[in-house]
Amino acid sequence: MTEDEAIRLALGSDSTVFHRQGDEGYIEGDYPLGWRAPGFKQRFTAVNFNSVLVMDSAQDAGGAWQSVTHQSSANFSVMHVASGALDRFAVFGLTRDKKPVVELWNLVAAAGTVVLHGSSGGTTSPQLVPKGFLKTRIYTGAPNQGAVAFEYDPAARYVVCAIRDPQGEVSLLQINAQNPSTPPVVLCNSTTVPELNDVRYALKADHTALGRVIKFGTAFKSHKRIMLVDASNDGVFDGPPLVGDDAYFAAQGLDTFEDWIDLDH
């Protein structure tokens, strides 16, 4: 689906209708896991390109899982959602005139009644409470851009976005999430890193030798990766990214599964 088609769908959809899977959703199967602790999980997704849904699940006293969902609509077309930590999300999308926007959506406790799913009739877990979204816009770009991929720092310091300009160049921008008035930092672009032209996804992880890493990857056929490294985890990336195909990273000893800790959940 093209971005234009996604925007038309977002503008025309009933945001109260949620599809767990299918052509209008983002995923098939279970929602991505944003947070996990003993007896508690928080999953999230976006549907119809105009809404975000978060599901809290907890075990009751009898060991059965109960869940409650929190959802809200956006006033732009939602292209990507990332989890930062418990109750903390970033949303990347396009306005009607295709300006890229980034918003922080934090869940906060709210008055209301929890409607349980999967309840066995036992006592409701104290972890399942009604919540509402507190939304803060931290970035609005120029018209006629493309929202390619992005990730959200687990410490809520920054968001890194891959944005395509009208001429087709893709740039990686680091946006200050704590002080949005600070101009974004251009980390690199597809003129110097041509692999950015084919980026499809982003994820964050810690590596035993490299430290904190934000990875942007291409399609799995002829797979390439662009790795932003922050060895000291101070929020400042260390020089130019590491770029290469799977064979390159294997040769560098950076493809051992056990050396990576996934930070998306």
Image: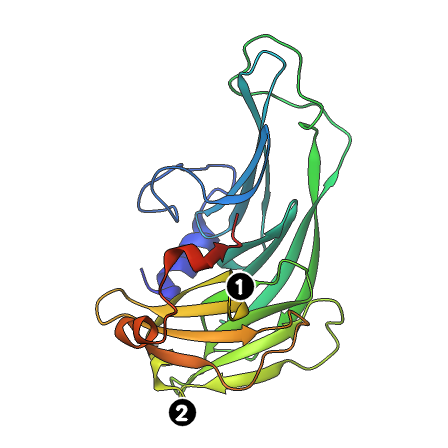
Q: Position of residue 175 (x, y in %)?
A: 63, 73
Residue drawn at point x = 60 percent, y = 31 percent:
38
Residue drawn at point x = 50 percent, y = 60 percent:
205
Task: Looking at this view, name the residue that lies furthest to the top.
Answer: 121
If the image is split into quadrants, where does the N terminus sit? bottom left
Q: Nearer the viewer, residue 217 or 257?
A: 257
Colouring used for the render: rainbow
Quarter holding residue 198:
bottom left
Q: CA distance from mark 2 to mark 1?
A: 22 Å
**Is residue 220 depicted above or below 170 in this figure?**
above
Q: Position of residue 170 (x, y in %)?
A: 43, 81
Q: Is residue 145 visible?
A: no
Pointer 2: residues within 10 angstroms few (<14), some, or many (20+)?
A: few
Quarter holding residue 123:
top right
Q: Nearer the viewer, residue 15 or 71?
A: 71
Q: Classify mark 1: helix, strand or loop.
A: strand
Q: Are marks 2 and 1 in contact (CB under 8 Å)?
A: no
- Three-letter amino acid code at disc 2? Thr
- Three-letter amino acid code at disc 1? Glu
Quarter holding residue 63:
top right
Q: Disc 1 marks which residue?
A: 151
**Is residue 136 depicted above or below 112 in this figure?**
below
Q: Position of residue 50 (x, y in %)?
A: 50, 51
Labelled disc at residue 191: 2
Q: Nearer the viewer, residue 1 or 90?
A: 90
Q: Classify mark 2: helix, strand or loop.
A: loop
Q: Earlier in the sequence, mark 2 or mark 1?
A: 1
